[in-house]
Amino acid sequence: MSINPELAGRSYPAQEPYVVGREKIREFAVAVKATHRAHYDLDAAAELGHSDLLAPPTFAIIVAQRADALLVNDPASGIDFSRVVHADQRFTHHRPIVAGDELVAELHVDTVRAMGGGAMISTRAEITTTAGEAVATTVSSILVRGEEA
């Protein structure tokens, strides 16, 4: 199945909230080798003016990937995940992510560009709190390789 060129302009609404937990922040910080004390220690986070542990900037990827899964798992997309190569990821933060946040993401398919037998797909996830406060915008590009002849 080939990539559906009509994906461009499609949006996938926010799903169940992701509740940011202290241990998830600590585990993520260890995984990405983020060493700032505010990722591990409540007092250090409070010294910086945060209400709880501060997530590393790339923590937003957890919520964004949940939104990306809606596109990848959409049968109408034509995406075979085994053929996906992650090409680019960018973050724009509107405010820090802290433990206790309840986050949702709405996914927008911005562009679909044919490339040989495959396609480059650019998406944008608008991450907000469940109260509607803007938290981060992530922009991602994936290359879906065409089938080999």
Image: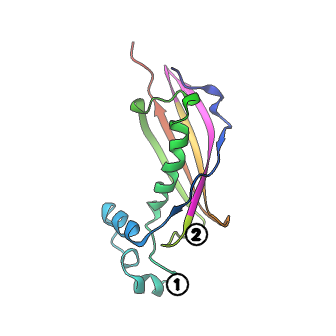
- Position above or below: 99 against 148: below
Q: What residue is drawn where x is 49% and y is 20%?
A: 116
The quadrant in which the C terminus is found is top left
Residue 52 image point, x, y percent: 48, 79
Q: What residue is drawn where x is 51% and y is 81%?
A: 50
Residue 120 image point, x, y percent: 52, 32
Residue 80 image point, x, y percent: 45, 29
Furthest toward the front, the residue is: 16
- Position above or below: 131 against 41: above
Q: Quadrant of residue 71?
A: top right
Q: Disc 2 residue type?
A: Arg
Q: Which mark, by number, is residue 8?
A: none
Is residue 94 toward the left or the right of residue 54 in the image? right
Q: What residue is drawn where x is 39% and y is 17%?
A: 148
Q: Which residue is mark 2?
A: 95
Element at label 1: loop
Q: Quadrant of residue 93?
A: bottom right
Q: Magenta: predominant secondary structure element?
A: strand
Q: Is residue 3 magenta?
A: no
Q: Is residue 117 magenta?
A: yes
- Position above or below: 16 against 141: below
Q: Disc 1 residue type?
A: Gly
Residue range (magenta) = 103-119
* Cα distance in 3D space between marks 2 and 1: 12 Å
Furthest toward the top, the residue is: 149
Q: Which residue is mark 1?
A: 49
Q: Residues within 10 Å of mark 1 (few under 14, many from 20)?
A: few
